[in-house]
Amino acid sequence: MKKPNVQLKNVKTFRGMEGIGINADLYINGVKCLFVIDDANGGGMTYEENIRHKDPELVKANIKLMDNYIATLPEQKSIYGDKTFSVKVDRDIFINNILVEMENKKNQKKMEKLMQTCVLIGIPNSDRYSYFNFKRPLSTIPRTTLQTQVTLIKMKNCKNGIEILNTNLQALGINV
């Protein structure tokens, strides 16, 4: 079954009693179909159908298309504490996966912007990192000076899985 184009727009986050909550518009194949609410009370998400759409049958058909697609998805591995288990992907998990993907893209974009003026260090594929800010584009720093600084940063800070995360250093002629 072909995956429908599902997007979250107008995402608003807030702090709730049991974590971070969201309000968002859910679009399926370009049609605003649902308003998604996670009130961060520890329960599941709430969905309000877009009853104001000029073609309510199209809204219903797109929601059914998404739900049918979700039903075909394989179980997903989940980790809680030190235990790993499989869970059936439902609408809440599917939407949460989209949110995680959006957040990852946002963080990656932020990191790429920082890499223009900073050397970032951290554990690869985690959302935690620190950086050394040179306060000017790395491309304007003489190559030998930058190489020396990168080598010092690596020697002093890169232990226990921590690595230099910059993807632009090699293009600048810097050995990592």
Image (cartoon, helix red, strand yellow):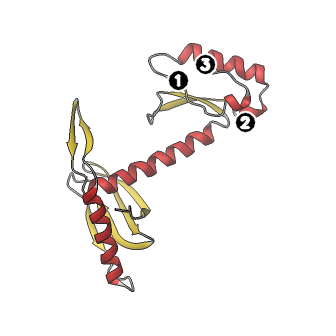
Question: On the rendered image, what quadrant is the N terminus found in?
Answer: bottom left
In the rendered image, the residue lying farthest to the bottom is 54
> Residue, x 33% and y 83% (percent of image)?
56
For disc 3, the marked residue is 153
> Residue, x 79% and y 25% (percent of image)?
142
> Residue, x 33% and y 53% (percent of image)?
96
Indicate which disc, 1 or 3, sits on the residue closer to the N terminus. Answer: 3
Q: CA distance from mark 2 to mark 1?
A: 21 Å
Q: Which mark is residue 27?
A: none
> Residue, x 71% and y 32% (percent of image)?
171
**Residue 153, image x and y in percent?**
60, 19
- Towards the viewer: 36 or 76: 76
**Label 1: which secondary element:** strand
Left or right relative to 24: residue 168: right
**Residue 81, image x and y in percent?**
23, 32
Q: Quadrant of residue 174?
A: top right
Q: Amino acid at mark 2?
A: Pro
Q: Which mark is residue 163?
A: 1
Q: CA distance from mark 1 to mark 3?
A: 10 Å
**Label 2: which secondary element:** loop
